[in-house]
Amino acid sequence: PATQSSADFFPVEGILDDVRETDLFGNPVRARKGERGRPRKELSEKDLDMLEAGLVQGWPTQRIAEALNIGRSTLKRNFGPLLKGRDMAPDRLQLAIFAATARKAVSGDMGAVRQLRQMLTENEQRAAAARMSRAAEDEQPEAAVGKKERARREAKQASEDSGGLWGGDLNPGNWH
């Protein structure tokens, strides 16, 4: 009888070249690229869209991680640069929508032309409101002053209004 070697029962090639798509728990098996440690978490295109949608809405990291069914630390470790751009996400979305609308409008889509005009009008209104708000902040009311400070200011004003008639006698703090 022919004897079988252990290689027939445990082929070495099969162990090193794991071609399974999922492990025993149903998690996808990713090809290792010779790197040590745990492989990077890879999100599907749908999950990346969900991540970006959460950032646009200003969701906290924990809420995004729960929605994607991954840990907070995994999200931070693998998608930190995206998370750092959280404050810019709404502006980036608006720019993308504006650019897409402008492309359609230039190609002759009349609905896009109307929408682009509306977007430009709204943007101009927001800019005008921001300018008015900044102007209102610049015109802050004068702080309340006490009796002594008011008397000092009035004396200084009277000294300046007299045109030097009284010399330095009316200047505040000029005692003889």
Image (cartoon, rainbow, N blue to C red):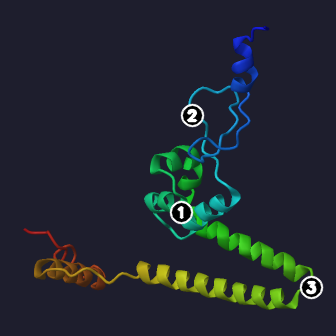
Using the image, determine if residue 156 lies above or below residue 117: above
Q: Residue, x 50% and y 61% (percent of image)?
A: 64
Single out the mark in the foreground, 2 or 1: 2
Q: Cα distance, mark 2 to mark 3? A: 51 Å
Measured Cα–Cα span from mark 3 to mark 1: 34 Å
Q: Which of marks 2 and 3 is nearer the N terminus?
A: 2
Image position, residue 102 (x, y; %): 81, 78
Looking at the image, the residue that sits furthest to the right is 107
Q: Mark 2 points at which residue?
A: 38
Under mark 2, the amino acid is Arg
| Identity of the residue drawn at 50% across and 67% down | 58
Amino acid bearing label 1 = Asp
* Disc 2: CA contacts within 10 A as few (<14), some (14-19) or many (>=20): few
Circle 3 Cα neighbour tier, 10 Å, few/some/many (<14 / 14–19 / ≥20): few
**Label 3 sits on what residue type?**
Gly
Q: Distance between the residues labelled 2 and 1?
A: 30 Å
Name which of mark 3 and mark 1 comes first in the sequence: 1
Query: Where is mark 3, residue-wise?
Result: 108
Mark nearest the camera among 2 and 3 is 2
Instruction: Please state which of residues 165 and 71 is positioned toward the viewer in this rendering.
Output: 71
**Residue at image location 46% in from the left, 51% down from the top:** 72
In this rendering, would 87 be left or right of 138?
Answer: right
In the rendered view, does 84 fall on the left or right side of 172? right
Rendering coords of residue 51 (x, y %)? 59, 61
Residue at image mark 1: 87
Q: Are marks 3 and 1 in contact (CB under 8 Å)?
A: no
